[in-house]
Image: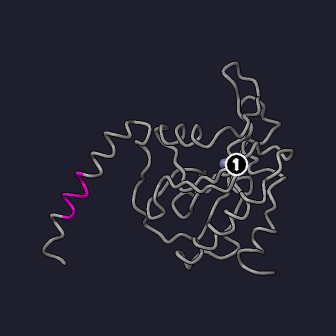
Amino acid sequence: MVSTLPALVVRAAAAALLLALIAGPAHARRNGPPRAQPVDMVVIHSTGGPTCDAHGRPIWVPGGELQDNLRTIEAHPRLGIHWMIDRDGGVHASVPEQQVAHHVLTHSRRSIAIELINDGDGRDAFAPAQIDALVALLQAIAHRHPALTLAGIQRHSDLDRGRLPCAPERRRKVDPGPAYPHDAVIERVFGPR
Ligand SMILES: [Zn+2]
């Protein structure tokens, strides 16, 4: 009902403010700018991967715990994520799909980001429950965003070919890594190619 809309909006804004006060600054980045173009890409990430330490040496950050990763990314001044999937298949939402989250160079405005808790090193096997949850989430995303085709399911490593500043011989982004069963996931979501 249109006449009640302003009251609803005010109530929703008050509720959002209250939630923000309760949640504190850790949830400050659980939002982003509204989208200006349709979603035709999903980017799969893993929480673990290479980086440079404070001394300028290359290190490998392990996958870590879901709540720690969510807290860190939501506290980041620029970065964001739409979904994070735990090793046990638990799916956690962050930035709403209708809003842009900055998670990959140049492709964030068109894409949805899914982060998998995994070391991303090719040795840390992805649990079947985690992959099952990813397949179900991708099917739901494809249903919500008709412009998404199988060609739009990308790994972060497919899109960012940059080099580590402290070790230029190494790639900057290699997630979700060689243990991630990319072709099998796409086949389960869209059927055999
Ligand atoms: Zn990534």
Q: Is residue 45 magenta?
A: no
Q: Position of residue 66 (x, y in %)?
A: 61, 43
Q: Position of residue 124 (x, y in %)?
A: 82, 45
Position of 122 with respect to 13 (left or right) is: right
Q: Is residue 12 magenta?
A: yes
Q: Position of residue 161 (x, y in %)?
A: 73, 49
Give the camera-side residue of 48 and 135.
135
Give the camera-side residue of 88 and 118.
88
Position of 83 with respect to 23 (left or right) is: right
Give, as a single range, the part of the protein colored magenta.
Answer: 8-14
Position of 170 with respect to 130 (left or right) is: right
Seen in the picture, residue 168 relative to 155 is either above or below; the reply is: above
Residue 114 appears anywhere in the view:
yes
Query: Which residue is at the far top?
Result: 55
Q: Residue at x 76, y 81 (%)?
A: 191
SS for dot 1:
strand
The overriding secondary structure of the stretch rendered in magenta is helix
Q: Which residue is mark 1?
A: 46
Give the camera-side residue of 117 and 182.
117
Q: Residue at x 81, y 69 (%)?
A: 184
Position of 115 with respect to 176 (left or right) is: left
Specify the quadrant that holds the N terminus.
Answer: bottom left
Q: Amino acid at mark 1?
A: Ser
Seen in the picture, residue 27 relative to 152 is either above or below; the reply is: above
Q: Residue at x 43, y 42 (%)?
A: 27
Query: Which residue is at the far right?
Result: 123
Seen in the picture, residue 109 relative to 168 is either above or below; the reply is: below
Disc 1 CB within 8 Å of nearest ligand 1 atom: yes
